[in-house]
Structure formats: C-alpha cells, structure tokens
Image (cartoon, coloured by chain):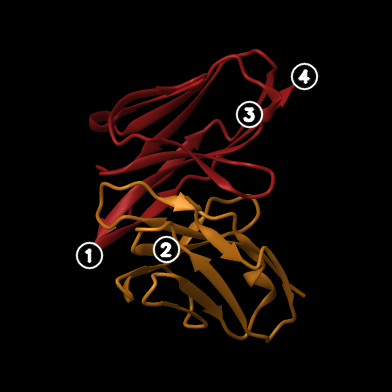
Amino acid sequence: DAGVTQSPTHLIKTRGQHVTLRCSPISGHKSVSWYQQVLGQGPQFIFQYYEKEERGRGNFPDRFSARQFPNYSSELNVNALLLGDSALYLCASSLPGKNTEAFFGQGTRLTVV
Amino acid sequence: GIQVEQSPPDLILQEGANSTLRCNFSDSVNNLQWFHQNPWGQLINLFYIPSGTKQNGRLSATTVATERYSLLYISSSQTTDSGVYFCAVLNYGGSQGNLIFGKGTKLSVKP
C-alpha cells in the first residue's frame, strides 16, 4: 500500500505569491493534518480535516487555509507569502479518533525568496 | 496546552554504543509516538506507545503514563541511526486531536 504522498517535494516562491501544497492520505484514512516545521524545531500543527470539515486549527494567520476533498486528499494554501513561511510542510493521515497512529508524508520543502 | 520536553538536545555516540532518549510531558495523554526524521525530512514511525513497553529490533520504548514520561532505547547504534528523534503526544480537543511535538534529540553516530 502506498503511504502518505505529498506534492511537490520542493518549491521556490517569491514574497507575496500564493502556494498550494497537496497531500494524498493512506487508503482508508479519512483524517488529514498539516504541520509546519522550521529549521531546528519540531513540527507545529496547522490544520486538521476529517470528513471534509475543519476539526482543528493551530496558531497560524488567516493567510493559511486548507480543504479536504471527497476522496480525502487535501490541499494547503498559503497567500501573500512571507520569508518566514520558508519551512518543511508535512502532511499526516490517520484513522479518526484519539487512539490512532499518525503517518507522515515526505514533506514539501518551501523556500520563499 | 501540553508541554513536551526532550532530552538531551544533542547526542554524539560511537558506533556500537547504547543510548537512552527521554520525553517528558506535562499532562495526561492518550497517544504518544516516537519518530525518526531522516536527513531528507521524512518522519519515520518508530513506536506508537501511549503506555507500556515495546521492542522492535535494536530499538525499544517505554512509556510510564502515570509519571508522564517516555524513554526510547537504542542499542548497538549504527551510523544509519543518525538523525533527529521526535516524541509527540496527542492534544485531544473537540472531535479530533493534533500531535504536539518536542524539539527533538539530534543523534550523531560516528563510525
């Protein structure tokens, strides 16, 4: 079975631009979460989606948005990019509930110049 | 919110040595996972261990939920064990939850 897949793997954008990152969960997983990891830190929670609805949001500005599609894949959108948005963006999928294991994709490395 | 602290922040070992990584958390948790992040950024699942002890080859982990800590043991370390090890706990809120990560332990294994 395929694991969590993310695209693209690397991306370079200019300040002020918009970016869309994509994630396909493990087959059968209906919950998708997004995390941002800056250099030297642990991943920070951005969003969680389950059954196409937002179920949780971290402490990120409104420039960050996401959605989940009927096939449970997800997109993370970031508007008006800032240099500080440069980071590794990770997507995780899991079965719903609190006693389930999360599995991560390989990440998208975004560089804002 | 829940605080997760990992120690030590950095660890340098000679190949073949054993090590213990620690994760302390500030509140009761339903879910605890250990990950290894490789140089390309991929988070690899090591253990899902909200309580008890598990072993997988040279790695084992123990979580004592009542005392709010977890330990990851690496025996007979190899150069391929190098990377950053993260502990993450579930912050359960609403109908779902998100993982809270520690800052990680950076392990370097020298040949």
Q: Chain of mark 1?
A: B
Amino acid type indicated by mark 3: Asp
- Return the residue at label 3: B81
Q: Colour of chain B?
A: red
For marks 4 and 1, the one nearer the N-term is: 1
What secondary structure is marked by label 4? loop
Task: Give the label on residue B111, or none.
Answer: 4
Whole-Å distance between the Cαs marked 3 and 2? 27 Å
In three-dimensional space, the C-alpha distance between marks 4 and 3, rounded to whole angstroms, equals 11 Å
Check chain identity for marks 1 and 3: say if they share one: yes
Distance between the alpha carbons at the discs numbered 4 and 1: 48 Å
As helix, strand or loop, the secondary structure at mark 2 comes to strand
Q: Are marks 3 and 2 on the same chain?
A: no
The disc placed on residue A33 is: 2
- How far apart are the alpha carbons under marks 2 and 1? 15 Å
| Mark 3: few/some/many CA within 10 Å (<14, 14-19, 20+) | some
